[in-house]
Image (cartoon, helix red, strand yellow):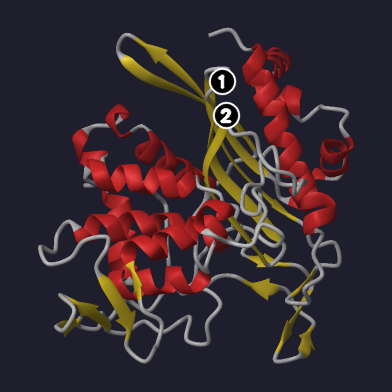
């Protein structure tokens, strides 16, 4: 028995020795120390991927810290990434539609295009833009499109920040076929979601509902579910589609994929947003999230963030064009010191974003020093 334990202990030490995240999370930087000293309360999960190029193509090497799909975290706006991909794929199946087709949702006065909605999703994480795509897709079909390509587990069950978030029936789209002719899409009836059976699905000790404090844990069992491994799987398939077999590649045209990649790294200023409010790193948590200064032009971050209910998540492909390096990282952290949800008292700026920013910088420095 002692021999077995010794062998396991040795194996554990070896794993720590080769996992860069162990070294990086041992950093003495205050933003890292503050989290790691009480890591249990922050529910941190991280997946970091080294990208190696060989004559045979791309090779991924993943390293994890506490990644566990059975431990629930609220994905917030990260679910907009699969919505954007699925919408582009569906457009390819309808001869009369393109990314530039104009439409509006029945009962809504805002006219937009699919391309504009996707741009808004990545530039400033617009909730209404995401919800319009969900009306186009339907929750069930969105989930199926992801699972069919090996992106899972995933369960998108509701819209974001709207009064009818849980409605299982989509609203019709009024779509312009030309300047004078419109068609109306058929509402989609989706499956009523069942309760998720996961660890940490109930969080905290109280929450506010209808301006009243409910003294019991907040139940996330009917919320969206999009864990680290699914987020990372989608990112890999979009950045490096040809690293996967044909059946796991999304049906995107070259024009669509180029547009999607540009949307993922474009900064708010490139779309005309006020730079005083929407600074470069407004939705770029890794490396630059704790600063409102302009980001260097040679570093491109293709990502999607989410933040709600005290949970911050970023799923990113980071590329330094000057130093010829690139890597992927997806991470989540819960910052809710008082354990009360819906009170709008979360330590995003004090703990969460500084941790993710420094994590990104530590990984970047590690990549600079890493032998190819």
Is residue 11 visible in the rendered structure shown here?
no
Mark 2, Cα crowd under 10 Å, few <14 / some 14-19 / many 20+, is few
Alpha-carbon span between mark 1 and mark 2: 6 Å
Is residue 36 visible in the rendered structure shown here?
yes
Q: Position of residue 13 (x, y in %)?
A: 71, 16
Q: Which residue is mark 1?
A: 322
Q: Which residue is mark 2?
A: 298
| Quadrant of the frame with the N terminus | top right
Q: Position of residue 163 (x, y in %)?
A: 52, 87
Q: Secondary structure at mark 2?
A: loop
The residue shown at (77%, 91%) is: 212
Front-lying residue, 185 or 212: 185
**Horizontal placement of 117 versus 280: left or right?**
left
Front-lying residue, 194 or 35: 35
Q: Position of residue 136 (x, y in %)?
A: 29, 72
Q: Is residue 211 above or below residue 6?
A: below
Q: Position of residue 280 (x, y in %)?
A: 64, 49
The residue shown at (69%, 43%) is: 294
The residue shown at (21%, 61%) is: 98
Q: Secondary structure at mark 1?
A: loop
Q: Is residue 76 above or below residue 5?
A: below
**Horizontal placement of 253 versus 55: left or right?**
left
Discs 1, 2 touching: Cβ within 8 Å: yes
């Amino acid at each position: 028995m002692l021999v077995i334990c010794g062998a396991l202990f040795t194996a554990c030490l070896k794993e720590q020795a080769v996992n860069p995240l162990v070294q990086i999370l041992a950093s003495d930087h205050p933003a890292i120390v503050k989290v790691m000293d009480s890591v249990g309360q922050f529910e941190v999960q991280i997946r970091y991927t080294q990208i190696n190029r060989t004559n045979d193509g791309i090779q991924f090497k993943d390293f994890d810290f506490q990644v566990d799909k059975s431990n629930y975290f609220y994905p917030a706006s990260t679910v907009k990434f699969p919505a954007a991909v699925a919408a582009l794929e569906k457009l390819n199946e309808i001869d009369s539609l393109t990314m530039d087709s104009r439409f509006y949702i029945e009962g809504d006065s805002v006219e937009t295009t699919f391309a504009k909605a996707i741009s808004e999703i990545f530039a400033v994480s617009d909730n209404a833009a995401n919800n319009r795509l969900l009306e186009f897709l339907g929750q069930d079909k969105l989930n199926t499109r992801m699972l069919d390509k090996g992106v899972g587990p995933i369960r998108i069950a509701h819209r974001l920040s709207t009064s009818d978030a849980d409605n299982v029936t989509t609203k019709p789209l009024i779509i312009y076929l030309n300047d004078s002719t419109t068609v109306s899409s058929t509402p989609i009836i989706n499956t009523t979601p069942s309760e998720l059976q996961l660890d940490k699905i109930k969080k905290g000790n109280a929450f506010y509902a209808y301006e009243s404090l409910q003294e019991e844990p907040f139940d996330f069992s009917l919320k969206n579910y999009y864990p680290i491994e699914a987020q990372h799987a989608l990112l890999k398939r979009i950045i490096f589609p040809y690293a996967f077999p044909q059946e796991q590649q999304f049906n995107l045209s070259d024009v669509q994929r180029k547009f999607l990649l540009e949307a993922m790294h474009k900064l708010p200023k490139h779309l005309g947003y006020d730079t005083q409010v929407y600074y470069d790193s407004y939705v770029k948590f890794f490396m630059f999230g704790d600063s409102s200064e302009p980001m260097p032009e040679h570093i491109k971050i293709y990502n999607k963030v989410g933040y709600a209910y005290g949970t911050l998540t970023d799923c990113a492909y980071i590329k330094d064009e000057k130093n010829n390096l690139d890597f992927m990282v997806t991470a989540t952290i819960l910052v809710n010191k008082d354990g009360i949800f819906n009170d709008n008292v979360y330590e995003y700026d004090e703990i969460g974003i500084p941790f993710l920013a420094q994590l990104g910088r530590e990984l970047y420095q590690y990549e600079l020093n890493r032998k190819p």
